[in-house]
Amino acid sequence: MRNITILEDQVYKVDIHLAESLMHVTWKQHIEGDLLQEKFLQLLDIIRRFNPRNWFGDARATHYITIQDAKWLLLNFIPSLIESSVLKYARLESTNSLMVLDSMSLQDKINALPQNKAGSFEFRFFTDEDQAHQWLAI
């Protein structure tokens, strides 16, 4: 299996696993606002460059998403993600974080977006890494 580290900084590490068509993102710290937007736009550029079918995001370092950031993600990032090569996005979260509540809401909103009317894009959140990888492999 050939893995390529595309980007690593103080905020996250982004690897592409070519054989699995997988983008693996490990968030290293909690971010908000302009920095969050910048980092997610960089991820879209990486997706457009490598066309992965699956995305595994380790978001255990993220504690919550602000209302403003959630709105920006839903209006600006998620529609572009749905129209990209990514078919499945599995996000790993800490069991004791507020992200689980954010993810439940996000899952419902993604399913309701007109861009996802065919249901070709799936988002799920997990607290167990093995379960997330198993779901991506299906």
Image (tube, rainbow, N blue to C red):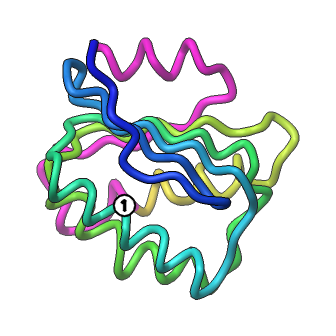
| Left or right, residue 94 beside residue 106 | right
User: Residue 64 vs residue 39: left or right?
Assistant: right
Residue at the farthest right position: 96
Looking at the image, residue 92 lies above or below residue 109: above
Q: Which residue is mark 1?
A: 43
In the picture shown, does residue 125 fall above or below 29?
Answer: above
42 or 96: nearer the viewer:
42
Q: Position of residue 32 (x, y in %)?
A: 68, 77
Viewer-side residue, 100 vs 4: 4
Quadrant (top left/top right/bottom left/bottom right) for the N terminus: top left
Q: Which residues make up the magenta segment?
A: 110-138
SS at circle 1: helix
> Which sits in the foreground, 91 or 43?
43
Task: Identify the residue at image location x=57%, y=87%.
Answer: 34
| Percent x, y of residue 98 | 80, 54
Query: Residue 81 lies in magenta, yes or no?
Result: no
**Relative horizontal placement of residue 95, taking residue 124 as reference (left or right):** right
Picture coordinates of residue 73 (x, y %)?
A: 46, 74
Q: Quadrant of the C terminus?
A: top left
Query: Residue 8, how many percent across, how many down?
Result: 52, 52
Q: Amino acid at mark 1?
A: Leu
Q: Quadrant of residue 56?
A: top left
Q: Quadrant of residue 125?
A: top right
Residue at image point 49% right, 79% down: 37
Number of numbered markers:
1
Residue that appears at 29% across and 64% down: 44
Image position of 51 with respect to 18: above or below: below
Query: Residue at image x 60%, y 20%?
Result: 129
- Asked which quadrant contains residue 46, the reply is bottom left
Does 134 lie within the magenta span?
Answer: yes
Q: Residues within 10 Å of mark 1 (few under 14, many from 20)?
A: some
